[in-house]
Each structure stands twice: as structure tokens, then as C-alpha cells.
Image (cartoon, rainbow, N blue to C red):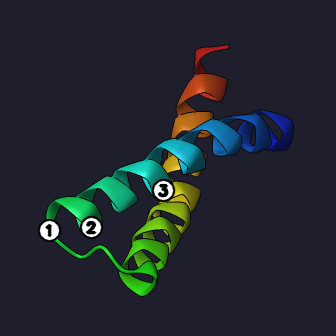
Amino acid sequence: MIRLALTLFSMIATSLAGIGVIVVLTLGHDTLVPILIGAAVGFVVAIPVTWIVAKKIAALR
């Protein structure tokens, strides 16, 4: 399941970090620090999301 989670993490983290950046830019914060914080929050949120998705996919097999 770890290999599945690592593969999923690369896609989920990219998506959630992008969403974080878009949210920050939509709120009007267009400097470097808020953009990096938004990307970092998306990256951190991706960890439990990946674990949940991997467990659900592994349960289907």
C-alpha cells in the first residue's frame, strides 16, 4: 500500500498545492510569502487525504 500511497501523493499534493495557490491569489494576496504558505498548506493537507484514498483503493482489491 505504501507504493500506491506514494504514487497517489505525487498527484494529490500537486493538485492541493495548486488549489492553495489559487485560493491565495483569489483572496488578493499576490506576494511570495502568502503564495508559499498556500502551497505548503495544500502539501500538508495532501498527506492525510492520500492515506485515506489509498486505504479505500486498497480495500477494493
Q: Could you tell me which residue is drawn at 57 percent across and 50 percent down?
A: 13
Label 3 crowd (10 A; few <14 / some 14-19 / many >=20): many
Amino acid carrying mark 1 in the image: Leu
Mark found first going from the N terminus, 2 or 3: 3
Q: Could you tell me which residue is drawn at 39 percent across and 70 percent down?
A: 38
State how far apart marks 1 and 3 are (Cα): 16 Å
Residue furthest to the top in view is 61
- Front-most of 27 and 49? 27
Residue furthest to the bottom in view is 33
Q: Could you tell me which residue is drawn at 52 percent across and 58 percent down?
A: 48
Q: Could you tell me which residue is drawn at 55 percent across and 63 percent down?
A: 43
Quickly name the residue at label 2: 24
On screen, residue 28 above or below 14: below
Residue 42, picture quadrant:
bottom left
State how far apart marks 2 and 3 are (Cα): 11 Å
**Whole-percent x, y for residue 22 in the image:** 30, 54
Give the number of the mark in front: 1 or 3: 1
State how far apart marks 1 and 2 are (Cα): 5 Å
- Front-most of 1 and 34? 34
Amino acid carrying mark 3 in the image: Ala
Q: Quadrant of the N terminus?
A: top right
Amino acid carrying mark 2 in the image: Val
Label 2 crowd (10 A; few <14 / some 14-19 / many >=20): some
**Disc assigned to residue 27:** 1
Give the number of the mark in front: 2 or 3: 2
Q: Contact, CB < 8 Å: mark 1 with mark 2?
A: yes
Quickly name the residue at label 3: 17
